[in-house]
Image (cartoon, rainbow, N blue to C red):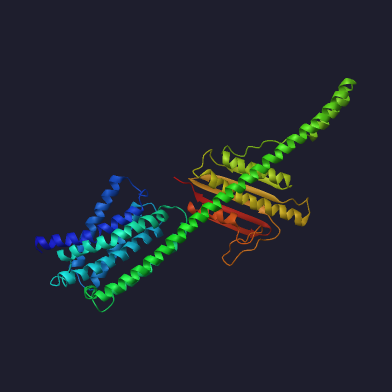
Amino acid sequence: MDTLRIFEVIIYSMINFLPFALLSLYHFKNMFRFGKAKTILLFSGLSVIQVIMGFTATFSAGGLTAVVTTTGYIIYFLFYIIAVKAHPGKILFVLLVYSNIGNLTVMSGKCLENMLFPAYAMQRNRWTFSLCNIIVDFIILIPIFIYARKNFTPIIQDKKYISSWKYIWLIPGTFHVTWYYLLYLVPLTPTEIAINPINILFLLAINLGAILVYHIVANFMITQTKISVLKEEANTYKLQQLQYKNIEAKIMNARRAKHNLRHQAIIMSAYLEDGKLDELKAYLEKYTHHFDSEKSVIYTTNYTVNSIISYYSYIAEYNNIDFDAVIDVPDFLNIPSEKLSIMLGNILENSTDACSDALKQTGDESNKPFINIHMKTKSNMLFLNVDNSYVNKPDTDSDGNLISTKHTGLSIGIDSVKEIVNENGGIFELSFDSGICRTSVIMALQD
């Protein structure tokens, strides 16, 4: 190989790699695992590997080209797994989308080369091919970037719906399998396919259809994000209502006590004026015994957790439910307070509702319903277990999701809990056995 040929292959390799790699990285801005210097070093190493792959693919034939290309994809994916802190499905989605667009630009570039430089068209990766690829990249990638920045970057940056990314990458993956078959498994060579403008128009139509599908997926994800925000706001508002009712009840109790205290003071003054000290002492003992002096129980020094637990302990006492809580968590948990209160509040609301229903249906106060809570942290993990009694097992749909007993449709509270647990890569389990409902949450605390 002469110097010009080496230079041609290097230029082709970088043109076929850099634009798509940089566009892919753009969507993961602010999600890099390492600092700027280390990320640039890793990217430089990936660029060198891609140039080596370009040389190998240029001077290989048949099945070896497919093997080299597949190896390049695997190395490309591993770089993103190492350098980017994101769900693997999310990374696969972005890489496969741009890989499919890259295949279209390469085929279009070869078609343009055949029109402008037919003498070089049947040769591999000449300077004419690189020039035509640059022209096609400007025509295709600029509008793609403008569109993707507006529609893809927000859902890539969003940390919700981690479970959805397990499957969404299969959409561009299906189109990628089609490309792989077209480029390597049909009797014609990629060059023979590309030099026919009719084939390029057909491939362009397929890619436009793919982009339409991606657009629908992006809109679906954005809609789900909005629904999630509304659910969180609704749950927060509901919790605020419960807290307001608690405060309102305490205010009414205080007014009632103040009203009663005036009458008690009159009786005690009469005993005192008549010199009936023994009777006054007996009356004070009786009054003190029956006075509704609510004790303030501190379950934990974590303000959010203690507020939720204390509130539901009050609700349990009011409804004649045995309530026991063993809490071992630090003052500060790396979970937003609103999410922690939504998760814990929804679980305990369901537990108290189940116990209240059980007491109403059985009417047996000797066999009191119960709620037992165990919550602790260990090795940057949060463990929560809530056991409560119930009478009637709630209905579920075909996927095992709880059906609400308060409104039509699924249980929004449990759905919100699952969502928060999934966001933190955790595990949520709900089981019903022998009159005991067991709710378990295990999840990592955020960095």
Pinpoint residue 435: horizontal percent, then vertical percent. Answer: 69, 58
Of residues 242 and 362, the one drawn nearer to the viewer in this rendering:
242
User: In the image as oriented, which residue stretches furthest toward the bottom?
Assistant: 187
- The answer to whether residue 70 is above or below residue 298 is below
Of residues 292 and 372, the one drawn nearer to the viewer in this rendering:
292
Q: Residue at x 41, y 54 (%)?
A: 154
Tell me, yes or no, if residue 292 can be seen here. no
- The answer to whether residue 225 is above or below residue 216 is above
- The answer to whether residue 394 is above or below residue 373 is below
Q: Quadrant of the N terminus?
A: bottom left
- Relative placement, left or right, of 226 versus 21 is right
- Relative placement, left or right, of 362 versus 202 is right
Q: Quadrant of the C terminus?
A: top left
Please tell me in which quadrant of the rendered image residue 125 appears.
bottom left
Q: Residue at x 64, y 56 (%)?
A: 437
Pinpoint residue 424: horizontal percent, then vertical percent. Answer: 48, 51
Please tell me in which quadrant of the rendered image residue 210 appears.
bottom left
- Relative placement, left or right, of 163 versus 297 is left
Q: Residue at x 48, y 55 (%)?
A: 225
Pinpoint residue 34: horizontal percent, then vertical percent. Answer: 33, 47
- The answer to whether residue 221 is above or below residue 122 is above
Tell me, yes or no, if residue 27 can be seen here. yes
- Relative placement, left or right, of 286 versus 415 is right
User: In the image as oriented, which residue stretches furthest toward the left?
Assistant: 2
Q: Residue at x 58, y 64 (%)?
A: 400
